[in-house]
Image (cartoon, grey):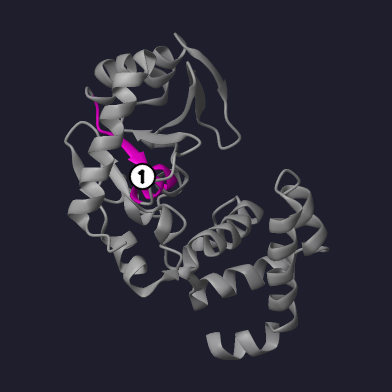
């Protein structure tokens, strides 16, 4: 598939309309929350729309105070998710919602808080698609740059990317995305994985523990890749530096 900004936009609009039609609770949230504020669908869901895959959940970042967001979310069945946002159950759908104030990159002042900067705060370029439901604006430059190169890269400058607190999760996602979409790793991504392996006492064991719910087939593939990177560490560092 030859993706472009327009194709991604059309697929996003089409899939959101279908969700709105099928899910009354989502339609209610869309009308009363998402269209009232700068509410951005980010990450893997839009990428899944592009490849005609049903996303397991939808992730939103909203430019609203966490206090006001909680006032609204408390009317629904929800729980605090592992990243400090709200996991909301809307009939047969799950959405994860964060206040923009609590987004880790904005909270740590790595970038100025804005909708325009959101695509540069997702960890990987293949998660960097952002769609503003209030304005119907799509931000796709970072994703499309990686898509054209067929390269999984880290969006932030390397002086910042180690500040992301979810290192094992990010390593897992890199291996998963590369496997699913047949992507190459950028040197930044390889260096990041090497940094993780170097700073883990038992990286393979930690990875297996984190990925306990994936299939044995995928686990074998991912651990093989990790072992390969461990064996090739010195050669890769020579290329990076």
- The location of residue 64, given as percent across then percent down, is 32, 27
Residue 218 vs 34, above or below: the answer is: below
**Start-end of magenta stretch:** 37-50
**Relative to residue 212, is residue 19 drawn left or right?**
left
Residue 46 in magenta stretch:
yes
Name which residue lies at 43% across and 16% down: 73
Q: Nearer the viewer, residue 44 or 106?
A: 44
Q: Is residue 133 visible?
A: yes
Decide: is 202 above or below 60: below
Q: Was residue 233 drawn as part of the magenta stretch in this picture?
A: no
Residue 176 vs 86, above or below: the answer is below
**Between 210 and 184, which is closer to the camera in this rendering?**
184
* Residue at the image point whose x is 24% and y is 27% from the top: 37
Asked whether 72 or 145 is in front, the reply is: 145
Q: Residues within 10 Å of mark 1 (few under 14, many from 20)?
A: many
Residue 130 % position (x, y):
31, 46
Give the quarter of the figure containing the C terminus. bottom right
Q: Residue beneath label 1, please?
A: 49
Q: Position of residue 9 (x, y in %)?
A: 22, 46
Which of the 4 quarters of the picture holds residue 14?
top left
Q: Residue at x 36, y 44 (%)?
A: 49
Residue 241, visible in the rendered structure = no
């Amino acid at each position: 598939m030859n993706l472009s900004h327009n194709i991604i936009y059309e697929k996003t609009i089409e899939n959101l309309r279908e969700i709105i039609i099928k899910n009354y609770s989502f339609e209610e949230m869309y009308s009363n929350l998402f269209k009232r504020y700068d509410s951005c669908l980010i990450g893997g869901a839009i990428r899944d729309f592009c490849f005609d895959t049903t996303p397991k959940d939808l992730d939103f970042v909203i430019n609203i105070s966490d206090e006001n967001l909680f006032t609204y979310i408390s009317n629904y069945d929800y729980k605090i998710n592992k990243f400090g946002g709200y996991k909301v159950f809307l009939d047969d759908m799950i959405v994860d919602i964060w206040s923009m104030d609590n987004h880790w990159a904005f909270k740590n002042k790595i970038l100025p808080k804005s909708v325009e900067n959101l695509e540069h705060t997702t960890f990987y370029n293949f998660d960097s698609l952002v769609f503003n439901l209030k304005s119907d604006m799509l931000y796709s430059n970072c994703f499309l740059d990686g898509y054209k190169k067929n390269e999984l890269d880290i969006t932030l400058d390397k002086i910042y990317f180690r500040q992301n607190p979810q290192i094992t999760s990010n390593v897992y996602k890199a291996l998963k995305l590369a496997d699913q979409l047949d992507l190459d790793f950028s040197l930044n991504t390889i260096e990041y994985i090497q940094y993780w392996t170097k700073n883990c006492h038992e990286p393979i064991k930690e990875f297996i523990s984190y990925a306990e719910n994936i299939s044995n087939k995928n686990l074998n593939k991912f651990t093989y890749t990790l072992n390969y990177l461990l064996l090739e560490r010195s050669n890769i560092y020579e290329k990076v530096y």
